[in-house]
Structures are given as structure tokens and as C-alpha cells.
């Protein structure tokens, strides 16, 4: 018997709303899609959010978020970054999980995989960027690998991304980017 489970809606945008105001060129926007994802949030309840991603990674994202829901890996919320006026800083400071954002890699003029919808950042407060000198830029954030909602090398969600050809920022050198996953190419 199927039971209908009502989710708390964290985001319910149309594709047009979720891409409004992006500086991305039309040929990039045309390859994107909007997916609904479900997760247990830190209140223990089922929530529904949304991600803007590249159509080529849709199956990966839908199935990995299926694993996230099944394994009750908690996520704060998943809201397209347009809500934060396309500011990565504001989205991260709100511990938001997001994917598409037409921007360059921090500190460079090279386009990030986020610019193509082929990267996703999950729970940035619990999985922050850590400089080679151990400094964390996000005020109040810390990395405690055994805390719920946090990734480490052996985490099933990390292994699932890696098995599908994604990279995990926790493997980046010298700067760790524990919340970041991307699929090159
Ligand atoms: Zn990222």
C-alpha cells in the first residue's frame, strides 16, 4: 500500500522564477532543468525543496537525493539561489543547499561547474571550505565529520557521487571544499 506523505514545502518555484535575473547566456539556460527533491530536515520532518541543474545530471541528482531521503541524511533546506539574489555568500550563510549559479570559481575568472548546473553544494555550514592553514571563512561554521549532515570520505552519499563520476571537494588540495560535488565535462 502506498502512503502519501505530505512534505513541508521549502521551495515551490517555476523554472522561470528560479532562473530569473541570472547572467547566464541562453544556450546554458536552455540545458537546465528544475527538480523537486525531498529530505528529512533537522526538525525530523519530510521537506521538499528544489534544485536547478543541468539536464545531463538529472538522473544522478534524483537518485542521490533518493538515497539522501532513504538514509535520513538531514539537510537544512534546498532553495534555488535566486532567493539569495544569486549571492553564494548569502546562500551559504543560510546553510542552503543549491546547484546552478552562473559564477566563477572563487578567486579566479574561470567559470565554476555551478555555472552549468553540474555542481551542488550541500549543508555548507556543516561542510565548510577549509584553507590549507585550517582557516574557515564562514563565521560560526565548523567541520565535525561525525555530526549529522556532515560528509567524510566513507560517507555513503559521498561514495554514491564518486561512483557516478562526480568529484568531492573534500578531496581537493590544498583547499578543502567539503560541501561541494561536481561532475566535470
Ligand atoms: Zn560548490
Image (spheres, rainbow, N blue to C red):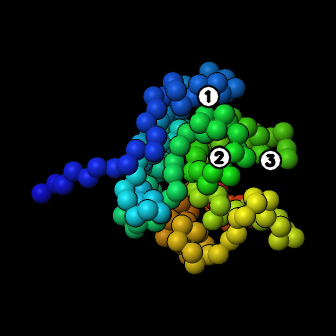
- x and y percent of residue 85 in the render? 66, 34
Asked if the residue at tag 1 contacts the one at tag 3, i.e. Cβ–Cβ closer than 8 Å, the answer is no
Placement of the C terminus among the 4 image quadrants: top right
Give the vertical position of 47 relative to 130 (above or below). Answer: above
First-in-chain label (3 vs 1): 1
Q: Nearer the viewer, mark 1 or mark 2?
A: 2
Is label 2 in a helix, a strand or a loop?
A: helix
Placement of the N terminus among the 4 image quadrants: bottom left
Residue 181 visible (yes or no): no
Q: Few, some or many C-alpha atoms within 10 Å of disc 1 (few <14, some 14-19, many ≥20)?
A: few
Give the vertical position of 34 relative to 61 (above or below). Answer: above
Give the vertical position of 52 relative to 134 (above or below). Answer: above
Instruction: Report how far apart the C-alphas of labels 3 and 2 lie in the structure.
Output: 15 Å
Q: Which residue is mark 1?
A: 28
Q: Residue at x 85, y 47 (%)?
A: 107
Is label 3 in a helix, a strand or a loop?
A: loop
Q: Few, some or many C-alpha atoms within 10 Å of disc 3 (few <14, some 14-19, many ≥20)?
A: few
- x and y percent of residue 28 in the render? 61, 28
Q: Which residue is mark 3?
A: 106
Amino acid at each position: 500500500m502506498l502512503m502519501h506523505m505530505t512534505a513541508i514545502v521549502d521551495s515551490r518555484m517555476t523554472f522561470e522564477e528560479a532562473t530569473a535575473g541570472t547572467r547566464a547566456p541562453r544556450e546554458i539556460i536552455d540545458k537546465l532543468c528544475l527538480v523537486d527533491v525531498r529530505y528529512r530536515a533537522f526538525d525530523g520532518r519530510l521537506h521538499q525543496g528544489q534544485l536547478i541543474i543541468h539536464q545531463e545530471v538529472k538522473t544522478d541528482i534524483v537518485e542521490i537525493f533518493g538515497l539522501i531521503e532513504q538514509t535520513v541524511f538531514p539537510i537544512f533546506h534546498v532553495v534555488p539561489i535566486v532567493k539569495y539574489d544569486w549571492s553564494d555568500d548569502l546562500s551559504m550563510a543560510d546553510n542552503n543547499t543549491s546547484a546552478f549559479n552562473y559564477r566563477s570559481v572563487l578567486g579566479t575568472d574561470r567559470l565554476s561547474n555551478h555555472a552549468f548546473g553540474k555542481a551542488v553544494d550541500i549543508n555548507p555550514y556543516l561542510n565548510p571550505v577549509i584553507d590549507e592553514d585550517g582557516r574557515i571563512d564562514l563565521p560560526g561554521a565548523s567541520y565535525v565529520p561525525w555530526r549529522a549532515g556532515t560528509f567524510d570520505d566513507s560517507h555513503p552519499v559521498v561514495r554514491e557521487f564518486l561512483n557516478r563520476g562526480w568529484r568531492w571537494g573534500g578531496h581537493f588540495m590544498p583547499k578543502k571544499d567539503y560541501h561541494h560535488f561536481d561532475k566535470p565535462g
